[in-house]
Image: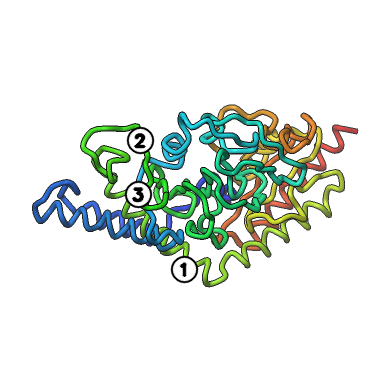
Amino acid sequence: MSRTFLDWNATAPLRAEARDAMIAAMDLVGNPSSVHAEGRAAKGLVERARGQVASAFGADGADVIFVSGATEAAALACQGRGLQAADVEHDAVAAWVDPVLSVDKRGAIDVPDPALSAVQLANSETGVIQDLPQGVAVVDATQAFGKIPVAFNWLGCGMALISAHKLGGPKGVGALVMPRGTDLAAQIKGGGQEMGRRSGTENLIGIAGFGAAATAAARDLDAGVWDRVAEIRNILELSIEAAAKDTILIGKGVRRLPNTACISTPGWKGETQVMQMDLAGFAISAGSACSSGKVKASRVLRAMGYDETTAASAIRVSIGPDTTEQDVLRFAEAWTSAYNRFARRAG
Protein backbone atom coordinates (compact mmCIF):
# COMPACT_ATOMS: atom_id res chain seq x y z
CA MET A 1 0.00 0.00 0.00
CA SER A 2 1.28 3.47 -0.84
CA ARG A 3 1.43 5.94 2.02
CA THR A 4 0.42 9.61 2.00
CA PHE A 5 1.89 11.88 4.68
CA LEU A 6 -0.61 14.48 5.88
CA ASP A 7 0.98 15.36 9.23
CA TRP A 8 3.32 18.20 8.32
CA ASN A 9 2.66 20.10 11.58
CA ALA A 10 4.15 17.16 13.47
CA THR A 11 7.23 17.20 11.27
CA ALA A 12 7.98 18.22 7.70
CA PRO A 13 9.82 15.84 5.36
CA LEU A 14 13.54 16.53 5.21
CA ARG A 15 14.42 18.95 2.43
CA ALA A 16 17.05 17.93 -0.11
CA GLU A 17 18.98 21.13 0.68
CA ALA A 18 19.12 20.19 4.36
CA ARG A 19 20.21 16.63 3.60
CA ASP A 20 23.02 17.85 1.33
CA ALA A 21 24.23 20.35 3.94
CA MET A 22 24.21 17.69 6.64
CA ILE A 23 26.16 15.19 4.53
CA ALA A 24 28.78 17.85 3.79
CA ALA A 25 29.02 18.72 7.49
CA MET A 26 29.83 15.10 8.32
CA ASP A 27 33.18 15.51 6.61
CA LEU A 28 34.27 18.32 8.97
CA VAL A 29 36.45 16.80 11.65
CA GLY A 30 37.02 19.88 13.80
CA ASN A 31 35.32 20.94 17.03
CA PRO A 32 33.84 24.45 16.63
CA SER A 33 35.53 25.47 19.89
CA SER A 34 39.02 24.53 18.70
CA VAL A 35 41.31 27.30 17.46
CA HIS A 36 43.14 25.33 14.75
CA ALA A 37 42.15 25.33 11.09
CA GLU A 38 39.82 22.35 11.41
CA GLY A 39 38.07 23.92 14.37
CA ARG A 40 37.75 27.26 12.60
CA ALA A 41 36.17 25.52 9.61
CA ALA A 42 33.55 23.91 11.86
CA LYS A 43 32.95 27.22 13.64
CA GLY A 44 32.52 28.91 10.29
CA LEU A 45 29.81 26.42 9.36
CA VAL A 46 27.93 27.13 12.62
CA GLU A 47 28.13 30.88 12.05
CA ARG A 48 27.03 30.54 8.44
CA ALA A 49 23.96 28.58 9.56
CA ARG A 50 23.30 31.14 12.28
CA GLY A 51 23.24 33.83 9.62
CA GLN A 52 20.95 31.75 7.39
CA VAL A 53 18.44 31.21 10.19
CA ALA A 54 18.59 34.87 11.25
CA SER A 55 18.03 36.06 7.70
CA ALA A 56 15.12 33.68 7.05
CA PHE A 57 13.48 34.62 10.36
CA GLY A 58 13.99 38.35 9.92
CA ALA A 59 16.27 38.42 12.94
CA ASP A 60 19.28 40.27 11.55
CA GLY A 61 21.04 41.94 14.46
CA ALA A 62 19.51 39.54 16.99
CA ASP A 63 21.09 36.66 18.86
CA VAL A 64 20.23 33.20 17.54
CA ILE A 65 21.04 30.56 20.15
CA PHE A 66 21.11 26.99 18.83
CA VAL A 67 19.52 24.42 21.14
CA SER A 68 18.17 20.88 20.83
CA GLY A 69 14.71 22.02 19.72
CA ALA A 70 11.84 24.34 20.54
CA THR A 71 11.13 22.41 23.75
CA GLU A 72 14.55 23.29 25.15
CA ALA A 73 14.17 26.84 23.84
CA ALA A 74 10.85 27.13 25.71
CA ALA A 75 12.44 25.94 28.95
CA LEU A 76 15.35 28.34 28.55
CA ALA A 77 13.03 31.27 27.81
CA CYS A 78 10.21 30.59 30.28
CA GLN A 79 11.50 28.75 33.33
CA GLY A 80 11.30 30.74 36.56
CA ARG A 81 9.76 33.85 34.98
CA GLY A 82 6.18 33.51 36.21
CA LEU A 83 4.72 34.05 32.75
CA GLN A 84 1.02 33.85 31.91
CA ALA A 85 -0.50 32.10 28.91
CA ALA A 86 -3.71 30.66 27.55
CA ASP A 87 -4.36 26.93 27.72
CA VAL A 88 -3.88 26.61 23.96
CA GLU A 89 -0.09 26.74 24.13
CA HIS A 90 2.03 23.78 23.10
CA ASP A 91 3.00 21.48 25.98
CA ALA A 92 6.60 22.71 25.73
CA VAL A 93 5.44 26.19 26.78
CA ALA A 94 2.50 25.09 28.96
CA ALA A 95 4.94 23.29 31.28
CA TRP A 96 6.41 26.62 32.44
CA VAL A 97 3.48 29.09 32.52
CA ASP A 98 0.29 29.89 34.42
CA PRO A 99 -2.64 29.17 32.02
CA VAL A 100 -4.86 32.08 33.06
CA LEU A 101 -5.30 34.03 29.81
CA SER A 102 -8.70 33.72 28.16
CA VAL A 103 -9.26 32.51 24.60
CA ASP A 104 -12.47 32.70 22.58
CA LYS A 105 -14.09 30.16 20.28
CA ARG A 106 -12.27 31.64 17.30
CA GLY A 107 -8.97 30.95 19.02
CA ALA A 108 -8.09 34.58 19.78
CA ILE A 109 -6.12 35.07 23.01
CA ASP A 110 -6.68 38.10 25.25
CA VAL A 111 -3.27 39.42 26.34
CA PRO A 112 -3.73 42.24 28.88
CA ASP A 113 -0.07 42.28 29.97
CA PRO A 114 2.22 41.30 27.08
CA ALA A 115 5.44 41.73 29.08
CA LEU A 116 4.34 38.94 31.42
CA SER A 117 2.92 36.65 28.76
CA ALA A 118 3.93 33.77 26.51
CA VAL A 119 1.82 33.66 23.34
CA GLN A 120 1.99 31.36 20.31
CA LEU A 121 1.98 32.94 16.88
CA ALA A 122 0.11 30.01 15.31
CA ASN A 123 -1.55 27.03 16.93
CA SER A 124 -0.31 23.60 15.90
CA GLU A 125 -3.73 21.93 16.14
CA THR A 126 -6.10 24.52 14.68
CA GLY A 127 -3.68 26.62 12.62
CA VAL A 128 -5.21 29.79 14.10
CA ILE A 129 -2.84 32.77 13.83
CA GLN A 130 -2.73 35.28 16.67
CA ASP A 131 -2.80 39.05 16.26
CA LEU A 132 0.11 39.61 18.63
CA PRO A 133 0.45 42.80 20.64
CA GLN A 134 3.86 44.41 20.86
CA GLY A 135 6.03 43.52 23.81
CA VAL A 136 5.08 39.87 24.38
CA ALA A 137 7.75 38.26 26.57
CA VAL A 138 7.96 34.94 24.69
CA VAL A 139 6.48 34.05 21.30
CA ASP A 140 6.31 30.46 20.08
CA ALA A 141 6.83 30.88 16.33
CA THR A 142 7.53 27.20 15.72
CA GLN A 143 4.53 26.46 13.49
CA ALA A 144 4.47 29.85 11.78
CA PHE A 145 8.12 30.06 10.72
CA GLY A 146 8.41 29.01 7.10
CA LYS A 147 4.66 28.90 6.42
CA ILE A 148 3.64 32.56 6.71
CA PRO A 149 5.61 35.81 6.46
CA VAL A 150 7.12 36.52 9.88
CA ALA A 151 10.10 38.54 11.05
CA PHE A 152 11.45 38.59 14.58
CA ASN A 153 12.41 42.23 14.17
CA TRP A 154 8.79 43.29 13.68
CA LEU A 155 7.21 40.91 16.19
CA GLY A 156 8.44 43.24 18.90
CA CYS A 157 8.79 40.39 21.40
CA GLY A 158 11.38 39.58 24.02
CA MET A 159 12.22 36.08 22.75
CA ALA A 160 11.00 33.67 20.09
CA LEU A 161 11.16 29.89 19.76
CA ILE A 162 11.74 28.11 16.43
CA SER A 163 12.49 24.55 15.33
CA ALA A 164 14.25 23.03 12.33
CA HIS A 165 12.11 19.99 11.65
CA LYS A 166 8.88 21.98 11.23
CA LEU A 167 10.28 23.56 8.03
CA GLY A 168 12.12 20.64 6.50
CA GLY A 169 15.28 20.58 8.58
CA PRO A 170 16.47 17.75 10.83
CA LYS A 171 14.90 16.77 14.12
CA GLY A 172 16.78 17.60 17.29
CA VAL A 173 17.81 21.22 16.62
CA GLY A 174 16.07 24.54 17.16
CA ALA A 175 16.82 28.04 18.28
CA LEU A 176 15.95 30.70 20.82
CA VAL A 177 16.02 34.16 19.25
CA MET A 178 16.35 37.36 21.28
CA PRO A 179 17.56 40.94 20.90
CA ARG A 180 21.32 41.15 20.94
CA GLY A 181 22.77 41.39 24.42
CA THR A 182 19.68 40.13 26.26
CA ASP A 183 20.56 38.92 29.75
CA LEU A 184 19.65 35.24 30.02
CA ALA A 185 20.87 32.71 32.58
CA ALA A 186 22.14 29.47 31.06
CA GLN A 187 20.54 26.22 32.17
CA ILE A 188 23.22 24.02 30.63
CA LYS A 189 26.60 25.23 31.88
CA GLY A 190 30.09 24.16 30.97
CA GLY A 191 32.24 25.40 28.13
CA GLY A 192 30.27 28.58 27.45
CA GLN A 193 29.22 27.77 23.89
CA GLU A 194 26.39 29.69 22.21
CA MET A 195 27.41 33.03 23.72
CA GLY A 196 27.35 31.50 27.19
CA ARG A 197 23.62 30.73 26.98
CA ARG A 198 23.84 26.99 26.17
CA SER A 199 27.03 25.04 26.78
CA GLY A 200 27.98 21.83 25.02
CA THR A 201 29.61 20.96 21.72
CA GLU A 202 27.37 22.21 18.95
CA ASN A 203 25.26 19.79 16.91
CA LEU A 204 27.24 20.65 13.80
CA ILE A 205 25.33 18.37 11.42
CA GLY A 206 21.90 19.42 12.67
CA ILE A 207 22.79 23.11 12.66
CA ALA A 208 24.02 22.88 9.06
CA GLY A 209 20.73 21.26 8.06
CA PHE A 210 18.74 23.90 9.94
CA GLY A 211 20.48 26.73 8.12
CA ALA A 212 19.95 25.18 4.70
CA ALA A 213 16.31 24.37 5.44
CA ALA A 214 15.62 27.90 6.66
CA THR A 215 17.04 29.41 3.47
CA ALA A 216 15.00 27.03 1.30
CA ALA A 217 11.84 27.72 3.32
CA ALA A 218 12.24 31.47 2.89
CA ARG A 219 12.69 30.99 -0.84
CA ASP A 220 9.50 28.94 -1.10
CA LEU A 221 7.55 31.49 0.91
CA ASP A 222 8.72 34.33 -1.35
CA ALA A 223 7.75 32.26 -4.41
CA GLY A 224 4.16 31.86 -3.20
CA VAL A 225 4.39 28.10 -2.72
CA TRP A 226 2.18 28.20 0.37
CA ASP A 227 -0.60 30.00 -1.51
CA ARG A 228 -1.07 26.83 -3.52
CA VAL A 229 -0.96 24.80 -0.31
CA ALA A 230 -3.89 26.86 1.00
CA GLU A 231 -5.85 26.16 -2.18
CA ILE A 232 -5.35 22.42 -1.75
CA ARG A 233 -6.30 22.61 1.94
CA ASN A 234 -9.52 24.40 0.94
CA ILE A 235 -10.33 21.66 -1.59
CA LEU A 236 -9.98 19.13 1.21
CA GLU A 237 -12.29 21.06 3.52
CA LEU A 238 -14.93 21.54 0.83
CA SER A 239 -14.89 17.79 0.18
CA ILE A 240 -15.31 17.02 3.88
CA GLU A 241 -18.13 19.54 4.26
CA ALA A 242 -19.98 18.06 1.29
CA ALA A 243 -19.72 14.56 2.75
CA ALA A 244 -20.59 15.26 6.38
CA LYS A 245 -22.91 18.11 7.31
CA ASP A 246 -22.43 17.53 11.07
CA THR A 247 -18.67 18.00 10.88
CA ILE A 248 -17.13 21.18 12.32
CA LEU A 249 -14.11 22.82 10.69
CA ILE A 250 -12.37 24.44 13.64
CA GLY A 251 -10.97 27.88 12.85
CA LYS A 252 -12.57 28.21 9.44
CA GLY A 253 -13.30 31.85 8.73
CA VAL A 254 -10.38 33.21 10.77
CA ARG A 255 -6.76 33.72 9.79
CA ARG A 256 -5.05 30.32 9.83
CA LEU A 257 -1.91 28.63 8.66
CA PRO A 258 -2.35 27.78 4.97
CA ASN A 259 -1.84 24.06 5.49
CA THR A 260 -3.93 23.15 8.52
CA ALA A 261 -7.42 21.64 8.74
CA CYS A 262 -8.83 20.79 12.17
CA ILE A 263 -11.92 18.63 11.71
CA SER A 264 -14.33 17.46 14.41
CA THR A 265 -17.21 15.06 13.90
CA PRO A 266 -18.87 14.94 17.35
CA GLY A 267 -19.17 11.40 18.64
CA TRP A 268 -16.55 9.90 16.29
CA LYS A 269 -13.40 9.72 18.37
CA GLY A 270 -10.35 11.35 16.88
CA GLU A 271 -8.19 8.41 17.96
CA THR A 272 -10.44 6.05 16.01
CA GLN A 273 -10.25 8.23 12.90
CA VAL A 274 -6.46 8.37 13.08
CA MET A 275 -6.24 4.57 13.24
CA GLN A 276 -8.74 4.09 10.41
CA MET A 277 -6.94 6.54 8.17
CA ASP A 278 -3.59 4.94 9.04
CA LEU A 279 -4.94 1.59 7.88
CA ALA A 280 -6.12 3.31 4.69
CA GLY A 281 -2.59 4.65 4.06
CA PHE A 282 -2.83 8.21 5.40
CA ALA A 283 -0.79 9.73 8.24
CA ILE A 284 -2.79 12.31 10.20
CA SER A 285 -3.01 13.17 13.90
CA ALA A 286 -5.47 13.88 16.69
CA GLY A 287 -3.55 16.79 18.19
CA SER A 288 0.03 17.74 18.90
CA ALA A 289 2.57 15.04 18.06
CA CYS A 290 4.34 15.79 21.35
CA SER A 291 1.31 14.29 23.11
CA SER A 292 1.66 10.98 21.28
CA GLY A 293 0.50 8.01 23.29
CA LYS A 294 -1.85 10.28 25.26
CA VAL A 295 -4.74 10.65 22.82
CA LYS A 296 -7.62 12.32 24.63
CA ALA A 297 -9.92 15.32 24.29
CA SER A 298 -7.96 18.25 22.87
CA ARG A 299 -6.94 20.67 25.63
CA VAL A 300 -6.75 23.38 22.97
CA LEU A 301 -10.35 22.91 21.83
CA ARG A 302 -11.62 22.70 25.40
CA ALA A 303 -9.89 26.01 26.15
CA MET A 304 -11.61 27.52 23.11
CA GLY A 305 -14.99 26.58 24.55
CA TYR A 306 -15.83 23.37 22.70
CA ASP A 307 -17.48 20.61 24.70
CA GLU A 308 -15.73 17.40 25.66
CA THR A 309 -17.33 15.34 22.91
CA THR A 310 -16.37 17.78 20.16
CA ALA A 311 -12.85 18.14 21.54
CA ALA A 312 -12.38 14.37 21.69
CA SER A 313 -13.61 13.96 18.11
CA ALA A 314 -11.09 16.23 16.40
CA ILE A 315 -8.41 15.30 13.91
CA ARG A 316 -5.73 17.45 12.33
CA VAL A 317 -4.81 17.16 8.67
CA SER A 318 -1.74 19.23 7.88
CA ILE A 319 -0.25 19.33 4.41
CA GLY A 320 2.75 20.85 2.66
CA PRO A 321 4.21 21.89 -0.68
CA ASP A 322 4.64 18.26 -1.74
CA THR A 323 0.95 17.48 -1.15
CA THR A 324 -1.12 17.25 -4.34
CA GLU A 325 -4.79 17.81 -5.02
CA GLN A 326 -5.09 14.10 -5.72
CA ASP A 327 -3.63 13.33 -2.30
CA VAL A 328 -6.32 15.26 -0.46
CA LEU A 329 -9.12 14.00 -2.71
CA ARG A 330 -8.06 10.41 -2.06
CA PHE A 331 -7.95 11.18 1.65
CA ALA A 332 -11.41 12.74 1.52
CA GLU A 333 -12.73 9.64 -0.25
CA ALA A 334 -11.23 7.30 2.37
CA TRP A 335 -12.42 9.51 5.22
CA THR A 336 -15.93 9.73 3.76
CA SER A 337 -16.15 5.96 3.46
CA ALA A 338 -15.18 5.61 7.14
CA TYR A 339 -17.55 8.42 8.10
CA ASN A 340 -20.47 6.70 6.37
CA ARG A 341 -19.80 3.55 8.37
CA PHE A 342 -19.70 5.61 11.58
CA ALA A 343 -22.95 7.41 10.67
CA ARG A 344 -24.75 4.13 10.01
CA ARG A 345 -23.66 2.74 13.38
CA ALA A 346 -24.59 5.99 15.14
CA GLY A 347 -28.08 5.61 13.75
Please name whichever residue, 12 or 273, is drawn nearer the observer in this view of the structure.
12
Look at mark 1 in the image and give the residue it sits on: 219
Secondary structure state at the residue bearing disc 1: helix
Q: Colour mode?
A: rainbow
| Mark 2 surroundings: few (<14), some (14-19) or many (≥20) residues within 10 A | few
- In the picture as drawn, the residue positioned furthest to the right comes out as 347
User: Could you tell which of marks 3 and 1 lies nearer the N-terminus?
Assistant: 3
Q: Could you tell me which residue is drawn at 29 percent across and 49 percent down?
A: 205
State the residue position of label 2: 185
Tell me which residue sits at (67%, 28%) in the image: 296
Q: Position of residue 240 (x, y in %)?
A: 78, 52
Secondary structure, mark 3, is loop
Give me the disc on residue 159: none
Marks 2 and 3 sit apart, C-alpha to C-alpha, by: 12 Å
What is the three-letter code of the residue carrying label 2?
A: Ala
Residue placed under numbered mark 3 in the picture: 181
Q: Looking at the image, tell me whether mark 2 or mark 1 is earlier in sequence order.
A: 2
Task: Judge depth for marks 3 and 1 and give the one in front.
Answer: 3
How far apart marks 3 and 1 lie (CA) works out to: 29 Å
Give the quadrant of residue 69. top left
Question: Which one is in front in this view, the residue at disc 2 or the one at disc 1?
Answer: 2
